[in-house]
Image: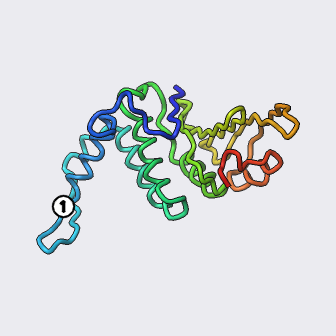
Amino acid sequence: MTYVDTGLLGLGTQANGGLSSFASTVVGGLRRMINIGQAGHLVLEADRTRSELTDRERRLEEIQRLISSVSMHLPKGFAVGLNGQFANMMADDAWEESDSLPSLRSLKSFLLMLIATGTKQRPGIGTNGRGSITAFWRDGENRLTIDCLPSGNTRWVLTRVNATGEIERAAAECQPERLCEVLDPFRPEVWFGQ
């Protein structure tokens, strides 16, 4: 499967105020876990329905927890948007059960890539159904797709219109922390918004 969420939360399949039914289930579970105590303090309660979650729902929780753990290194509002994108991508009406869940190693590679590039623009996301997470940016004819692999590496391909109007294409594999250096000749600010 290659379901791609382009950064905007999809509208067609959503209910409950803009959330997919799957995202509504996750949000509902969080609401059940959080209560305000008598003195006005936040009280977290054990979620009795946790054992009823599917593997996909558990993986989504893990993904959202990891995103939240690095949110201070991302632009304001980025983590909330990413959590919504992953919830939409993994929703019942979008997910194919035969696909492998995104691996946590791919997610770590994905988050390291976002932090290392310093991107100001949230990418569209997808998965190849084999555990990788795919990020993509597009600005007109300029396209960048980065596969964040379970190995910890990134594999990327780009199409870039140069200063003379010619289309250049390139592809390579590298560690996430080297992406800026490797992409620099192609002026990646068109994708990353810097």
Q: Which residue is mark 1?
A: 35
For the residue marked with disc 1, what is the amino acid? Asn
Label 1 Cα crowd, 10 Å radius (few <14 / some 14-19 / many 20+): some
Residue at the spot x=37%, y=33% of the render? 91
Foreground pick, 194 / 60:
194
Q: Is residue 48 left or right of residue 88?
A: left
Percent coordinates x, y for residue 9 in the rendering: 43, 38
Foreground pick, 1 / 10:
10
Q: Is residue 158 left or right of residue 29?
A: right
Specify the farthest residue to the bottom.
39
Where residue 21 sits, quadrant-wise, is top left
Above or below — where is 116 with respect to 155? below
Marks counted in the figure total 1
Percent coordinates x, y for residue 70 in the rendering: 50, 60
| Chosen colour scheme | rainbow
Q: Is residue 179 left or right of residue 63?
A: right
Percent coordinates x, y for residue 100 in the rendering: 48, 32
Q: Quadrant of the C terminus?
A: bottom right
Percent coordinates x, y for residue 172 in the rendering: 77, 40
Specify the farthest residue to the front.
164
Residue at the spot x=65%, y=51% of the render? 193
Above or below — where is 130 with respect to 184? above
Q: Secondary structure at mark 1?
A: strand
Q: Is residue 4 left or right of residue 65?
A: right
Above or below — where is 186 with respect to 94? below
Specify the farthest residue to the left.
38
Above or below — where is 57 with respect to 98? below
Residue at the spot x=22%, y=55% of the render? 33
